[in-house]
């Protein structure tokens, strides 16, 4: 194998499930001609992330899983050496593929007691099983970032929380579950993306903390992972001047951070993978095609993710890199391929997600992270009305309650219909709020005018709010701390709505705990 072929094994460019035949053939040619080592799958070119965001795209979403299967088979047939297939599937294959199992977000799992790491490990195992039977080998997860900044635009719901011990323990449990299923995971985003207020997809975040502070918080979960033998770490596109003698250089292209600090000082000897090299925090820094790939490799990355200049990148590395460093990274990739059994892998035949068992598992999980966020502790009596926001009147939560204790349901929507007079006939209100998006962009998809009206209602009479969504959205509700009670179910899964209804009816207790970190 010549040197360029070895370098090519370090590249994992992006492939898109909803691609055109022209794009697919171009990727097949890249696999055959450049002999790349892997492919990282994304949903579509318009939306690298999630089908749950309801973005407007002129695409057919039919048979997405079948498309993924077909593409993996085609690309593997074009490869001389089996491709290392990777994906971002933090909360399951459903992060990229419709009609596949979705598991709770990290923020949801992070509300569980710290002793529940066995359940987190099972989540990782189940996600890993789903991925492996689809022909995927690497999941770029878990997120080991501590969500120390409540205004963080990109981590938030992806983090296990604000406590370094729980984040460390849950991240490692998730990773163990993946490995048990035959999937390699990746702690990310080193040296820690939690305390930032810039989205590295759009610009470069800078962590203005001392080295000591970074070691005590941001780096702590990564250090615990390294000690436990984690095999892969993803480095983020964020600057930590305390680690680079005051320079605002992205960690992903900093030799001081990757080679000198992560590998040498912290003793990590696994695979270092770059965050996506098309992200704007870094992609605009090097206009010459291939130079960015060289800088990322020179810094110490072994696996180059989402390179948009593969041919040029291979040439740059071949011209500038030390042969020993090429050989070391190449050996790491080949060792991983052998460890994961790629050379003995059989073609994909059938996929079984065991849906009944999946739903039963969610029923087990839901009460574990159900959390009482606000509780005035006073009993309520008299006539109750139900109020639904941003969800149809007939939601499962209310339907389950009605089966035991029927009462009228009202809808707060953008019709401007004043329902306050009707609610005056009731002593207190049970509110269900379904948050449209887990991401903070556009106020989590919430209608702020509706939330102002809800706050006005809560000033007049006691309101008990059950939130189905990201609890980081709570500050969007004016005076939300004055509500009589707020319970967070985190997800909109039927299992979570059932658990919330059972909690309201006094049949179960909320086992989770979640608190808003102050700005």
Image (tube, rainbow, N blue to C red):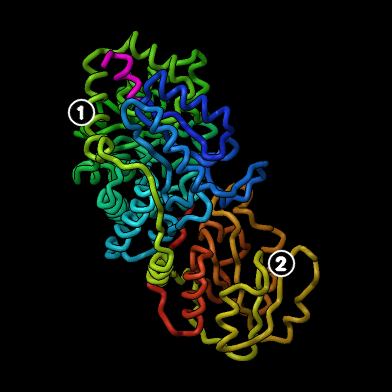
Disc number for residue 73 = none
The circle on residue 453 is 2
Residue 271 in the magenta stretch? The answer is: no
| Residue at x 46%, y 57% (from the top left corner) | 102
- 478 or 251: nearer the viewer: 251
Q: Is residue 312 above or below residue 383?
A: above
Main structural element of the magenta stretch: helix, strand or loop?
helix
Placement of 488 over or under 74, stated as above or below: below
Q: Which residue is identified by label 1?
A: 264
Along the line of sight, the residue nearer the viewer: 88 or 240: 88
Residue shown at 30% from the left, 28% from the top:
258
> Residue sitting at 31 percent across and 28 percent down?
81
Image coordinates for residue 211, horizontal then vertical, percent: 30, 35
> Sequence-wise, which precedes: disc 1 or disc 2?
1
Span of residues in magenta: 1-10
- Asked whether the viewer can see residue 465, the reply is yes
The x, y position of residue 289, in whole percent, is 48, 15
Residue occupying the point 47% across, 26% down? 282
Q: CA distance from mark 1 to mark 2?
A: 57 Å
């Amino acid at each position: 194998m010549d040197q360029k072929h070895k370098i090519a094994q370090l590249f994992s460019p992006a492939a898109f499930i909803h691609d055109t035949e022209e794009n697919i053939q171009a990727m097949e040619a890249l696999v055959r001609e450049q002999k790349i080592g892997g492919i990282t799958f994304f949903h579509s070119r318009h939306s690298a992330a999630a089908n749950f965001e309801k973005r407007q795209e002129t695409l057919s979403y039919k048979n997405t899983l079948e498309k993924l299967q077909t593409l993996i088979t085609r690309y593997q047939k074009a490869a001389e050496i089996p491709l290392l297939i990777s994906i971002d599937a933090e909360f399951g294959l459903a992060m990229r593929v419709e009609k596949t199992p979705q598991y709770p977000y990290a923020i949801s799992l992070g509300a569980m007691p710290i002793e529940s790491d066995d359940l987190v490990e099972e989540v990782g195992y189940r996600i890993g099983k789903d991925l492996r039977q689809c022909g995927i080998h690497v999941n770029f997860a878990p997120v080991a970032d501590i969500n120390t900044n409540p205004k963080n635009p990109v981590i938030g719901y992806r983090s296990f929380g604000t406590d370094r011990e729980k984040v460390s323990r849950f991240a490692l449990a998730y990773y163990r579950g993946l490995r048990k299923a035959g999937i390699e995971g990746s702690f990310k985003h080193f040296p820690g993306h939690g305390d930032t207020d810039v989205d590295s997809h759009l610009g470069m975040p800078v962590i203005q903390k001392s080295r000591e502070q970074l070691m005590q918080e941001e780096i702590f979960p990564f250090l615990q992972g390294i000690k436990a033998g984690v095999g892969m770490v993803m480095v983020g596109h964020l600057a930590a001047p305390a680690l680079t003698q005051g320079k605002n250089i992205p960690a992903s292209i900093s030799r001081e951070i990757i080679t000198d600090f992560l590998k040498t000082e912290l003793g990590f000897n696994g695979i270092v993978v770059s965050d996506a090299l098309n992200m704007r925090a870094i992609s605009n820094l090097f206009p010459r095609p291939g130079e960015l790939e060289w800088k990322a490799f020179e810094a110490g990355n072994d696996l180059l993710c989402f390179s948009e200049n593969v041919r040029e990148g291979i040439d740059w590395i071949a011209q500038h890199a030390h042969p020993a460093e090429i050989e070391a990274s190449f050996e790491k990739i080949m060792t991983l391929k052998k460890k994961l059994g790629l050379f003995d892998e059989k073609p994909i035949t059938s996929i079984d997600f065991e849906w009944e068992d999946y739903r039963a598992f969610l029923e087990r999980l839901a009460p574990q992270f159900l959390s009482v966020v606000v509780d005035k502790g006073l009993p309520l009596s008299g006539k109750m009305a139900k109020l639904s926001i941003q969800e149809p009147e007939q939601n499962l939560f209310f339907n389950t309650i009605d089966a035991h204790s029927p009462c009228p349901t009202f809808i707060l929507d953008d019709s401007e219909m004043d329902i306050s007079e009707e609610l005056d006939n009731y002593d207190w209100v049970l509110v269900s709020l379904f948050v449209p998006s887990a991401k903070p962009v556009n106020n989590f998809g919430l209608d702020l005018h509706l939330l102002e009206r809800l706050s006005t209602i809560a000033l007049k009479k006691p309101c008990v709010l059950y939130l189905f969504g990201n609890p980081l959205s709570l500050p969007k509700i004016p005076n939300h701390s004055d509500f009589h009670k707020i319970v967070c179910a985190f997800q909109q899964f039927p299992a979570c709505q059932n658990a919330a209804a059972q909690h309201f009816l006094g049949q179960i207790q909320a086992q989770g705990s979640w608190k808003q970190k102050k700005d």
